[in-house]
C-alpha cells in the first residue's frame, strides 16, 4: 500500500502548470453549470480549452455517432439558449471557444476533432478530452458501455487522445447562469465545487505526466463524484478520491406489456453483482466506495477489451502508478479531501447572484421531460441510482 502523507498531497497541489489544449464535452448539454464551471477553471489554470457539446440533454448514446440530418435546429435547445431554426452548429456569441452541435456526445468529439478545431483554431489534436461533469453517476461496466458521456471519452481514446469522464451525485442539471457566488449556506455552488474537484484531479494528472502523455495509449479514467451538500452544509464538500474498479449496480431488463405487445426498459438499478474478472480484485468496486459515504470513485479503464492473457495482469502498483497521489487507496489513513487539505469552499457572499440571460429559465421539469422523452430514460435510471446511493 502506498503511503500518502499530507505533505505529498500538498506538493501535488502546488506543482507547476503547463498549458495544454483541452477539449471539453458532456451529454447534458453545452449550457449546464458543471461544464461551464469546469471550462472556466481549466482556462484559469492556464490551459487552452474548447467546449463543444450539444444544445440539448442526451442520454444513453454510448459511442453512437448521430450527425443531424437538418442544417437547422428543429426545436429549442435547453433553457432556450439556442432557438429552433438556428444553425445546427455554432459558436457561443460571447466566447468563440464554446460551440454547440446538434449530435450525440461521440459526434461532438469527432466534429470538434475533424472540423471545429482544425477550421477555427490552431490546435491540430487536443492533448486531453474531458467529458462532464455530468449529472448522475455512471457506475459499473453496463453504464460504462451505454453512457454517451463515457462514449465521448472512448471515442477520443480510440483516436489516441487520453480522456477522463466525470459524473456528479447532484442529479439535476442546472444552467450556467444559475451558478451563484455563494449558496444560502454561505458556501460555493455545488457546480463550482464539482468542477473544482474535476479540475484538481485533471491538473494533478497533468502535473504527474510532466509533459508526456497523461495516460498510456488506450487508457482513460471514469470518475464519480458524490453529492455535494453545499446548498445546505459543509458535510460533503471536499471528498477524497479513492481508486476503484468497475463493478455491478446497473443492468437493463426488458419488461413486456401484454396489453400493448410492446417492451419497456425496466428502471431497476440491477443486480448487486461486484464480480471482478480483470484488474486487481483488491481494489473496491465503484458502487461500494460511493455507497460508503462522501468519497469519489476513480477507475482506470482500457478500451482494449481483450481479456488479459494472464489473470490479474495489472497488479495494484501497476494501476496505482497511472493515477496521481491524490487518488488514494481505500483504507488509507488519513483520506485527504480531493481539493487538498484544509481547502476552503466558502462562498463569496458579497457578490450578487448571477443574473440570468434574457429569458427566464423554464422550470427544471423541462429538463426531466427531455430525459423522459429520450429513448432509454437513462436519466431516470441514473437519478434512481443517485437516490439509492443515499438510501443504502
Ligand atoms: C442562484 O440565485 C438565484 C437568485 O437568488 C436563484 O434563483 C437560483 O436558484 C440560485 N441558484 C442555485 C443553483 O441555487
Ligand atoms: C413504458 O413506460 C412508460 C413510462 O413509465 C409508460 O408510460 C408506458 O406506458 C410504458 N410502456 C409499456 C409498453 O409498458
Ligand atoms: C507488481 O508490482 C510490483 C511492485 O509492487 C512490481 O515489482 C512487479 O513487477 C509487478 N508485477 C507485474 C506482473 O507487473
Ligand atoms: C475500505 O477500507 C475500509 C478500512 O480498511 C474497510 O472497512 C471498507 O470495507 C473498505 N471499503 C470498501 C468499499 O472496500
Ligand atoms: C490544516 O489545518 C490544520 C489545523 O488547522 C493545521 O494544523 C495544518 O497545518 C493545516 N495543513 C495545511 C497543509 O495547511
Ligand atoms: C468577492 O467578490 C468581491 C467583488 O468582486 C471581490 O472584491 C472579493 O475579492 C471577492 N472575495 C473573494 C474571497 O473571492
Image: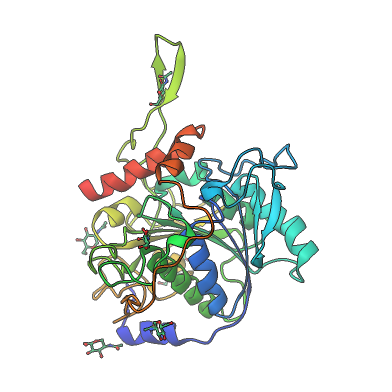
Q: Position of residue 219 (x, y in %)?
A: 56, 60
* In this view, 21 is above or below 228: below
The quadrant in which residue 163 appears is bottom right
Q: Residue at x 49, y 69 (%)?
A: 322
Q: Residue at x 67, y 62 (%)?
A: 93
Q: Residue furthest top?
A: 259
Q: Position of residue 55 (x, y in %)?
A: 59, 49
Quarter of the picture holding the N terminus: bottom left
The answer to which of 276 and 242 lies nearer the viewer is 242
Residue 337 visible to the viewer: yes
The reply, left or right, for residue 173 in relation to residue 182 is right
* In this view, 192 is above or below 310: below
The answer to which of 382 and 247 lies nearer the viewer is 382
Q: Position of residue 348 (x, y in %)?
A: 35, 77
Residue 158 visible to the viewer: no
Q: Position of residue 75 (x, y in %)?
A: 61, 39
**Quarter of the rendered image showing ligand 1:** bottom left
* In this view, 148 is above or below 121: above
**Count of numbered badges drawn on the protein:** 0
The reply, left or right, for residue 307 in relation to residue 10 is right
Q: Residue furthest right?
A: 119
The quadrant in which residue 174 appears is bottom left
Q: Residue at x 61, y 50 (%)?
A: 82
The reply, left or right, for residue 141 in relation to residue 161 is left
Amino acid at each position: 500500500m502506498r503511503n500518502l502523507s499530507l505533505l505529498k498531497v500538498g506538493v501535488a497541489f502546488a506543482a507547476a502548470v503547463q498549458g495544454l489544449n483541452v477539449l471539453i464535452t458532456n451529454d447534458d448539454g453545452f449550457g449546464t453549470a458543471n461544464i461551464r464551471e469546469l471550462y472556466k477553471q481549466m482556462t484559469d489554470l492556464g490551459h487552452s480549452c474548447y467546449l463543444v457539446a450539444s444544445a440539448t440533454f442526451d442520454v444513453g448514446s454510448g459511442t453512437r455517432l448521430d450527425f443531424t440530418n437538418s442544417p437547422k435546429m428543429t426545436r429549442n435547445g435547453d433553457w432556450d439558449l439556442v432557438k429552433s431554426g438556428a444553425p445546427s452548429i455554432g459558436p457561443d456569441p460571447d466566447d468563440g471557444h464554446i460551440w454547440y452541435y446538434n449530435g450525440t456526445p461521440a459526434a461532438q468529439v469527432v466534429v470538434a476533432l475533424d472540423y471545429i478545431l482544425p477550421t477555427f483554431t490552431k490546435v491540430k489534436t487536443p492533448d486531453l478530452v474531458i467529458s462532464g461533469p455530468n449529472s448522475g453517476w455512471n457506475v459499473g461496466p453496463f453504464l460504462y458501455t451505454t453512457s454517451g458521456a463515457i462514449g465521448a471519452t472512448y471515442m477520443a481514446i480510440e483516436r489516441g487522445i487520453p480522456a477522463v469522464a466525470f459524473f456528479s451525485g447532484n442529479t439535476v442539471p442546472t444552467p450556467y447562469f444559475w451558478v451563484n457566488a455563494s449558496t444560502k449556506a454561505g458556501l460555493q455552488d455545488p457546480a463550482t465545487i464539482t468542477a473544482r474537484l474535476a479540475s484538481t484531479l485533471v491538473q494533478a494528472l497533468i502535473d504527474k505526466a510532466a509533459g508526456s502523455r497523461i495516460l498510456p495509449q488506450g487508457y482513460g479514467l471514469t470518475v464519480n463524484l458524490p453529492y455535494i451538500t453545499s446548498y445546505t452544509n459543509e458535510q460533503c464538500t471536499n471528498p477524497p478520491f479513492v481508486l476503484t474498479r468497475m463493478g455491478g449496480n446497473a443492468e437493463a431488463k426488458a419488461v413486456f406489456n401484454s396489453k400493448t405487445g410492446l417492451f419497456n426498459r425496466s428502471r431497476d438499478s440491477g443486480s448487486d453483482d461486484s464480480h471482478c474478472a480483470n484488474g486487481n480484485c483488491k481494489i473496491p468496486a465503484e458502487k461500494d466506495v460511493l455507497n460508503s459515504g462522501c468519497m469519489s470513485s476513480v477507475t482506470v479503464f482500457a478500451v482494449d477489451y481483450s481479456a488479459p492473457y494472464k489473470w490479474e495482469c495489472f497488479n495494484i502498483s501497476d494501476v496505482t502508478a497511472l493515477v496521481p497521489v491524490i487518488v488514494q487507496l481505500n483504507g488509507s489513513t488519513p483520506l485527504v479531501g480531493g481539493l487538498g487539505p484544509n481547502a476552503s469552499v466558502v462562498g463569496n457572499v458579497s457578490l450578487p447572484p448571477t443574473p440570468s440571460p434574457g429569458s427566464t429559465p423554464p422550470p427544471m421539469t423541462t429538463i426531466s421531460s427531455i430525459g423522459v422523452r429520450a429513448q432509454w430514460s437513462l436519466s431516470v435510471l441514473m437519478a434512481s441510482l443517485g437516490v439509492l446511493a443515499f438510501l443504502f
